[in-house]
Amino acid sequence: MEPATAGAEIISEAYNLITGQRQNDYDHPLEDYSRTVDIFRAITGINLSAEEGIMFMVSMKLSRLANELINELNVPDNTRDAIGYLGCLNMVRRKQREEQSEIDRVFDQLHKHYKTGDSTWG
């Protein structure tokens, strides 16, 4: 009898796909999908954010998963890839929050500097 967690290893497989060597090869998903949507925009004239580009890829995998259900197929890479794309989406959102926090910190320092006339930068 298989353990109750049988099949959950696909999460680890997806994690391994979006981190490590693949990330080294393609950059962080924010940079990777920013390039991807830039190319898409050049081809179609349609402007997508990196997040929307990833959601498009999730949609494609959901379409394939629906086809699997209809045709009684089991193609594990569709499930793994959908999980991976959702992981990429989370990575992009986190990096965007971190970058925004850094921008906010710099603007706060500028505001304090000019408001007080303080000549130090900290």
Image (cartoon, grey):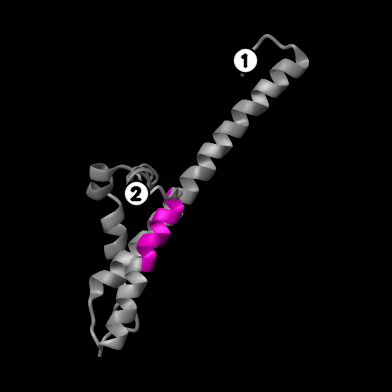
Ranked by sequence position, the earlier of labels 2 and 1 is 2
Where is mark 1, residue-wise?
121
Amino acid beneath label 2 = Phe
Residue 61 among those drawn in magenta: no
Quadrant holding the C terminus = top right
Q: Position of residue 119 (x, y in %)?
A: 68, 9
Secondary structure under tag 2 reads: helix
Say how many tags the image has. 2
Where is mark 2, residue-wise?
40
Q: Give the Cα distance between marks 2 and 1.
A: 42 Å
| Residue for point 49% across, 50% down | 93
For this orientation, the residue located farthest to the top is 119
Q: Position of residue 85 (x, y in %)?
A: 36, 60
Front residue of this view, candidates 94 and 53: 53
| Residue for point 66% across, 21% down | 110
* Disc number for residue 82: none
Residue range in magenta is 50-59
| Residue for point 25% across, 90% down | 1
For residue 11, side relative to residue 102 (left or right): left
Amino acid beneath label 1 = Trp
For this orientation, the residue located farthest to the right is 116
Report crowding for label 1: few under 14, some 14 to 19, many 20 or more residues within 10 A (C-alpha): few
For residue 84, side relative to residue 94 (left or right): left
Work out whether 85 lies above or below 102: below
| Residue for point 34% across, 61% down | 84
Q: Position of residue 80 (x, y in %)?
A: 29, 68
Please name which of the two marks, 2 or 1, marks the residue nearer to the observer: 2
Secondary structure under tag 1 reads: loop
